[in-house]
Amino acid sequence: MAKDTYFYALGRRKSATARIRLQGGKGVITINNQPAEEYFAGSKHLLAKLQQPFTILDQTNKFDISVVVSGGGHDGQAEAIRLGIAKTLTAMNEDFKGTLKRADLLGRDSREKERKKFGLRGARKQRQFTKR
């Protein structure tokens, strides 16, 4: 893979959206122009989520990743990035698709926050019933 060639994919989770650019390199992950360790400071499990597609495929430290992520919280953003990384790997090499699909990394988790309804306190919570 040439140095200026890259693969692009989009990952979403809850209200977070991650745009991923993957190219050959040394395993550097940059999120919103910050190193991943700095962006997800103190969250080793979130950094492990980002590495999950690479560890399953035994491709660690072979690609540089540039991410632009917006919306949601850190957990939703990490899962959106993970989905985007898995999609870019399948765009790069179609042979990875079966392995990533068996590991459940190519499916989008479509659960979203339910909207507040008129006359209720939230999406489903109602006012307390009083008999007298």
Image (spheres, rainbow, N blue to C red):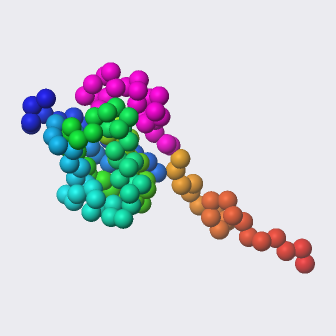
Q: Position of residue 7 (x, y in %)?
A: 21, 34
- Residue at the (21%, 39%) spot, across then down: 63
Q: Residue at x 46, y 33 (%)?
A: 103
- Give how far across and how far down residue 94 sits, in percent: 31, 22
Q: Quadrant of the C terminus?
A: bottom right
Image-based side of 97 in relation to 124, left or right: left
- Which residues lie in the magenta part? 89-110
Determine which quarter of the picture holds residue 130: bottom right
Q: Is residue 122 above or below residue 55?
A: below
Q: Residue at x 28, y 28 (%)?
A: 91
Look at the image and tell me whether residue 20 can be seen: yes
Residue 15 visible here: no
In the rendered image, which quarter is residue 23 located in? top left
**Residue 18 percent coordinates (x, y):** 32, 48
Q: Which residue reaches farthest left?
A: 3
Instruction: Judge whether residue 108 is colored magenta.
Output: yes
